[in-house]
Amino acid sequence: MKKQIFFLLFLALAAYGQMQERIAVINTMDDFDSISVADLTYLTDRLRETAVNVLPAERFGVMTTESIVAFLGSMENTVRVCKESSCLAELGRQVSADYVAQGRIGRFNDNLTIKVELYSVKSGNLMGSFTGNEKSVFGLLALIDDKAADLFKRMLAEPRPIVVEKPETAKMEPKPEVMVVEKKPNKTLFWVAVGLDVLGAGLLVAGYLKDNEMLDAYNTYNIDEQDQSHYNSAWDETDRVRTQRNLFYILGSVFLASGIGVHIWF
């Protein structure tokens, strides 16, 4: 029963995670070793911070460096893959992201240059980019502060696809109208679903506690088997606690399943 409870809780968390689209801000690369690793890391952190500030948390999740490294195996492998990758969208698929962004540092005459690109992983299309050149790293940082927010805002205009017709039917009879609509987050339904999840999980935990209480009552019933004065009352107590336990399990499962259903469908 413990495994069932943990499994249901895992499903609830998974349903919440499905509501978010993930963006991976990959480590900034330097093609000519023009600046230090620490400066590259700071520029990456500023890009990631801008994404967090611009994108609504209920729809988008910004991946951390640790989560990106976890997908690629190690920090050393992450640096190698980021350097060698010729397709940023493919790199986004490797880390299970929906969007991927990266900055690259170069040189133009005596100036430092930066190019930041944002890709949709699903389509592989370039959604936007900005470039610039500055005398110093501080100039590059100011350029990021000036232009990165507008770049990430392009993601807000991306619709969430909803299939309204079977694929084979769509191929046979192409229609001019748009086949996808934007699904706007509904905060009320979200909190209703969370409330159902919490209530369901609480009832399951209460059922588990009642299961332990039932075992104690049953042990008391066995001990009092020779004492007729306590025998019947011990059995009644065991039966009462078992009924409560089953009720908690049933209600908890119904509420938790309802919460998961609201997460998935709305």
Image (tube, grey):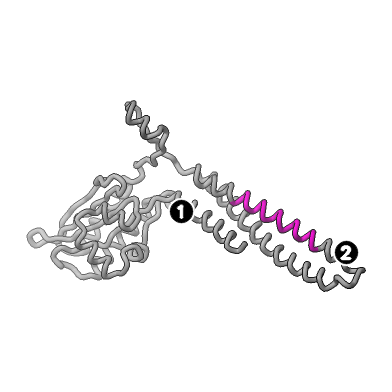
- Quarter of the figure with residue 3: bottom right
**Number of labelled discs?**
2
Q: Residue at x 34, y 42 (%)?
A: 158
- Asked if residue 97 lies in the magenta stretch, the reply is no
Q: Residues within 10 Å of mark 2 (few under 14, many from 20)?
A: some
Q: Which image quarter holds the N terminus?
A: bottom right
Quick check: marks 1 and 2 in contact, CB under 8 Å? no
Does the rendering let one see residue 160? yes
Q: Residues within 10 Å of mark 1 (few under 14, many from 20)?
A: some
Range covered by the magenta-colored residues = 238-256
Q: Residue furthest left?
A: 109
Placement of 13 over or under 125, stated as above or below: below
Q: Circle 2 — which element? A: helix
**Disc number placed over residue 232 in the picture, else none:** 2
Amino acid type assigned to the residue bearing label 1 in the image: Gly
**Distance from the alpha carbon under mark 1 to that under mark 2:** 50 Å
